[in-house]
Structure formats: C-alpha cells, structure tokens
Amino acid sequence: MKKIILVLLFLPFGFVIAQTQQKPKPKAKPVSAEAKTSAANGLIVFTQNCVSCHQADGGGVPRMNPPLIKTIWVLGDQTRLVKVILNGFKEDVEINGEYYSNVMPAFNYLKDQEIADVLTYVRSSFGNKASAVTLKQVTATRAANGK
C-alpha cells in the first residue's frame, strides 16, 4: 500500500520533468552567404525607401500601410512581390482581417539588385522565413513587365 501511495505522490513530478525536457528543434535551412549579403544590403534600401510607411519593425500603419510580417504578400509569389515594387499598388488590400488603403508608389527607379536585396531582407526579417529573391528573378520580371 505504501508503494502505491509513493508512486501516486511522485507520478506528477515525472510528468512535469517529461514536459520540461526540450524537444529537438528541426534543423533550419542554411542561409547562403550571398543571401545574407543581399539581406544586409536590403536593410539599407529598406531604411531609405520603405521604413517611413512600413515602419522599422515591419508592422505598417493600421488601415493605411500594410504590415510585412508573415503575410501571403511577402511570403508568397515572388513575381507578384517584384511587380508591386515596380508598379506600385493602388488597391485596397485585406490582411489578417484588416483593410489597408494607402497607395504605394512605384519604386521602378531602384536597380534590379536593390529590389532583389530589399525583398530578400523583407522576406527574411520581421519573423519571416522565406527564400531570397534573386537578381535574375527581378531582371526577368522587369523585362516581362516592361518597366
């Protein structure tokens, strides 16, 4: 009987210990040196061109300028994202149940490498974990877009 009582007394401690043991984290994909350099250069472009509307934390401005944090616009189709930079954006957009209506001007004066860099920065910052945008992708999109 004493053994059963002892087991019942210490059983909750076993659950606590099991719960507090860390599970192995999945291995993150290695980031290439080229992507790291591109993101670092992208921070400069972001600071010069984007931060006033999208804010330093990528949170945007409620009902005006959308956030860049974990949205399908940032993490999704890279070609669409490049086109937003090249053409600007004039539509109302719904993100996470909130609508944003401020017009984003075209930034087609940026060099292709600057666009690749800033988009790589945005896609890998603010908690985002998406692949880099390459110079080749931007150049091809600009050529197809006629800008």
Image (spheres, rainbow, N blue to C red):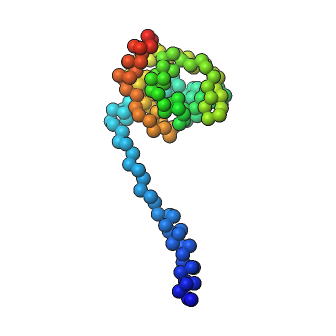
**138 or 36: which is nearer to us?**
138
Q: Which quadrant is home to the N terminus? A: bottom right
Which corner quadrant of the image does residue 101 belong to?
A: top right
Q: Which quadrant is home to the C terminus? A: top left
In the rendered image, the vertical position of residue 32 relative to residue 146, given as above or below: below
Residue under the image location 51 percent in, 16 percent down? 87
Residue 8 coordinates in the image, percent (x, y): 57, 79
Residue at the far bottom in the pictured view: 1
In the rendered image, the vertical position of residue 124 relative to residue 143, given as above or below: below
Q: Is residue 19 left or right of residue 62?
A: left
Which corner quadrant of the image does residue 111 belong to?
A: top left
Residue 25 coordinates in the image, percent (x, y): 42, 53
**109 or 77: which is nearer to us?**
77
Residue 9 coordinates in the image, percent (x, y): 57, 79
Whether residue 44 appears in this view of the structure is no
Residue 92 coordinates in the image, percent (x, y): 63, 22
Residue at the far left in the pictured view: 33
**25 or 61: which is nearer to us?**
25
Which corner quadrant of the image does residue 57 belong to?
A: top right
Q: Is residue 128 left or right of residue 37?
A: right
Whether residue 4 appears in this view of the structure is yes
Residue under the image location 46 percent in, 33 percent down? 123
